[in-house]
Image (cartoon, helix red, strand yellow):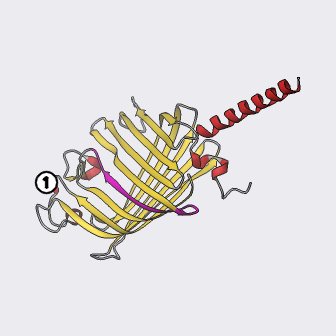
Amino acid sequence: MILSFSMGIYASAQEELKKDSVVVDTVKYWSVLGKNTLMINQAAFSNWVGGGANNVGWLAGVNYNITYEKNNDLWENIIVMDYGQNDTKGLGVRKTQDAINVSTNYGRKFSKSWYFSMGAGLQSQFAAGYEDGNNPSAKKISNFMAPGYLNLGMGITYRPNDNLTVTLRPTNARWTFVLDKELQLAGSYGLKNDGDTSLLQFGFLGTALYKVKLMENVHITNTASVFSNYLDHPERLVLAYGAVLNFKVNKFISSNITLDLLYDHNQIQKTQLKQTLGIGFAYTLNNGVKRSDRKDSQWWIKK
């Protein structure tokens, strides 16, 4: 009787141990957080004294963060792509949004939240851009990979949690590509001579990402970067800041307000500004809890 009772307790304990092991084993070292959006806006007028032009517009975008975390290894990949158009009566179709931003960064932890890191990033656009509000009959000023920017460098990354990442690269190569022959003119995007297809710069690159939850279903994502070219006019900083304010209505509907600021002496000696507002369909893909989201990995939270 006693032996049978003891064996029962042992079997129960083993079962509990197996359950605990299953929980531990389900930690996802690969995590995928992605947002797919399609936003549509429309306005119609008939005998409207206040005036106005019928128009319809759309904006499609993907924003994915694919991360690998295990022990001292951290590999983060970001894919952001947006494209949108607006068709206004009397003006025709104009581009309203166009962006390609892909980056990868691998880090090896050497202290709490600090990593030796190296990575690369590519920025460009899908289609041609024109003066006079993207009017296709106006002068062309940009195109796919004209310009295109490729960064490759090494440094350190500070990442205490999923909401804050700061990377500093004192050694960073920055290639500017202008692959459209019509735009390969001396001075265009920093090109030295007519017919040049690229420009190589070497300097310091700093990037930061900071996410804030303002209230339930309202989040803002801030991104910033600074680049200084050691080889030529290091005081001419390339500065960029972006903010996305997201209002989540439900699982499939959300609204976004975006703001982008950019200063690049090689593009134009003025501060560039872009702002958009949209509401539409959004679907978020999330494959589960990342290791860094677990309480036992968050050393900065007082237990």
Q: Give coordinates of residue 95: x percent, y percent.
A: 30, 43
Q: Is residue 59 magenta?
A: no
- Residue at 13% across / 54% down in the picture? 182
Q: Give coordinates of residue 281: x percent, y percent.
A: 48, 32
- Residue at 14% across / 62% down in the picture? 196
Q: Which residues are magenta?
A: 110-126
Report the residue marked by disc 1: 182
Viewed as shown, does residue 93 lie left or right of 33? left
Can you tell which quarter of the image residue 141 is in? bottom left
Q: Give coordinates of residue 258: x percent, y percent.
A: 46, 49
Q: Is residue 121 magenta?
A: yes
Is the residue marked by circle 1 packed among few (<14), some (14-19), or many (20+) residues within 10 Å? few
- SS label for mark 1: helix
For badge 1, the amino acid type reads Glu
What secondary structure do most residues of the magenta stretch adopt? strand
Residue that lies at the very extreme toward the left in this rendered image? 195
